[in-house]
Amino acid sequence: MFNKKNKYLAYTSSNKIELLHSGKPYFDKLLSIIGVAKYSVHLQVYILEEDETGQKVADALIAAAQRGVAVYLMPDGYASQSLSSKFIKALTDTGVKFRYFEPLLKSEHFYFGRRLHHKVTVVDGFYSLVTGINITNRYNDMPGEPAWMDWALYTEGATSRELSKICIQLWSKANHLNQKPQDTIVTKKIEGECMVRVRRNDWVKRFNQISRSYIDMLKTSRSHVTIMSSYFIPGWFIRQRLVKASRRGVKIKLILTGVSDVKLAKSAECYIYRWFHRNNIEVYEYNRGVLHSKLAAQDGKFVTIGSYNVNNISAYASVELNLDIANEDFAQSTEKELEKIIAEDCTLITPEIYSKRYNFIKMSLQFLSYLTVRMLINISTFYFKQA
C-alpha cells in the first residue's frame, strides 16, 4: 500500500482503536462516549430518525448539553427531513446546537446538491467514532429484528483531534460563521501506537482521498483484497484496478448484500456479476439480512472503513469520511472476521449459480436496471464533475 519514501505520510501514530459491529456494540459505545463528554460533542450523520434508537441518542445529547457540554448536531437535510419540529425543539430548548446540512434543492423524493453522507461523532477532541451506521432502529438490535450489517471504528487520540477540526469546519461553513467554535481538547496518554489517517471525499472541496485509497490499495496489492460493500457499482478507475490486480494473481473477494433496501441498485449490481466472473473475482452474497458495510482489507496489512460506497455517487456527489489503518495486527484480525462471515453467513455466487438463478428475462431487466442507475448517477453527479 505504501512506498518506502512516504510510507506513513498523513498518518498519526498516537491512536487506540477498536472495530465495532453495528447494533448494540456500536450504540453502546456511542452513548458511552457522549455520557463522559466534558467539553464538546460533534455528531454529524446522514439519517437521524426519531424512533427508539434516535430518541436514546437525542436524550444522551440533551443530558450532555444540560451539564454544560457544547453539543453540535448536524444531520443531512434531505435524508433526515422527516424529523418533527417537536423533536428538534426538545433538542434546541436544552442547549443542543442543531443545524441541517442543506442540499441546493430538495423535496420529499428529490435532492440536488451535496449530501452529508458521512457518519462521525467526536467527543472532547479525544474519543471518536467513524462509521457507515445511521441513527435509526434499522442499524440497532431490536426485538426480533437484527441490525443491518455495518461497521464502525472507535478511536482515541490524535485521529480524533483531526476529526474534531473537520467537524468544526463543516459546522461553521454550514452556518456561515466567520469565527469557528473553539474546542477544548482532552489529552491523555495512549498505550500502544496504531497508524491511522483520515480520508475524505468531497468533490466540491476537491477531496478524493477515499477513492485514491481504494485505487492505491488495488494498485499495490500483492496477495489478496477483500471488499465488503453495499451498492457496489464501481466506476471506470476502480474497475480497471480490479482487473489489473486480478491479472497479477491477487485474490479478490467481494462481499455484497443478498437482500438490499434499494432493489434497483441490487439489480444493477447483479448485472456486473458476469463481469466479475470473467475477471476471476469471487462474489459472495451476505444472507443474514441487509448488508450496509463499507470496509476493505488488503494483504493483512491495511484496512479502510467508513461511509464510502464504491460507486460514483460517493466519489462525486457526497461528503464522505473514512479512516485508513496501517496496522498488521488490526488488519489480520479484521480479515479473520471477514473470513468467518464468508464461511457462516454468505453464499458464493459462481457462474453456474448465476446462470441457474437468472434467466434471459431477468438478465435483461438487470441490464436495464444498470443503465437506469448509471443514468441517474451521471445526472446527479454531472454538476460536481464540472464544478
Image: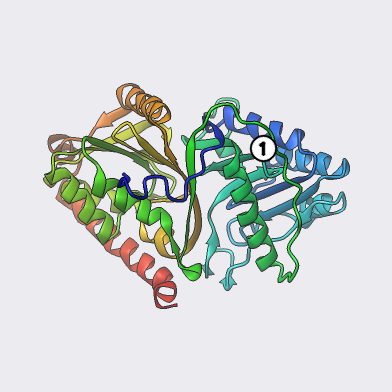
Tell me which corner region of the image, top left, top right, bottom left or bottom right, holds residue 4: top left
Query: Where the C terminus falls, by quadrant?
Result: bottom left
Q: Nearer the viewer, residue 288 or 154?
A: 154
Q: Is residue 165 above or below residue 379?
A: above
Q: Residue at x 73, y 37 (%)?
A: 34
User: Residue 28: percent from the left, percent from the top?
Assistant: 65, 29
Q: Is 283 on the left or on the right of 171, as rendered? A: left
Q: Residue at x 43, y 69 (%)?
A: 380
Tell me which corner region of the image, top left, top right, bottom left or bottom right, holds residue 385: bottom left
Report the label total: 1
Q: Secondary structure at mark 1?
A: helix
- Residue on which disc 1 sits: 53
Q: Is residue 81 above or below residue 131?
A: below
User: Residue 173: percent from the left, percent from the top?
Assistant: 66, 67
Q: Is 63 on the left or on the right of 192, as rendered? A: right
Q: Residues within 10 Å of mark 1 (few under 14, many from 20)?
A: many
Q: Residue at x 75, y 67 (%)?
A: 179
Q: Residue furthest bottom?
A: 386
Q: Amino acid at mark 1?
A: Thr
Q: Residue at x 59, y 40 (%)?
A: 129
Q: Nearer the viewer, residue 163 or 4?
A: 4
Query: Where the N terminus falls, by quadrant?
Result: top left
Would residue 367 be seen by someone viewing this image from the given angle? yes
Q: Is residue 254 above or below residue 180?
A: above
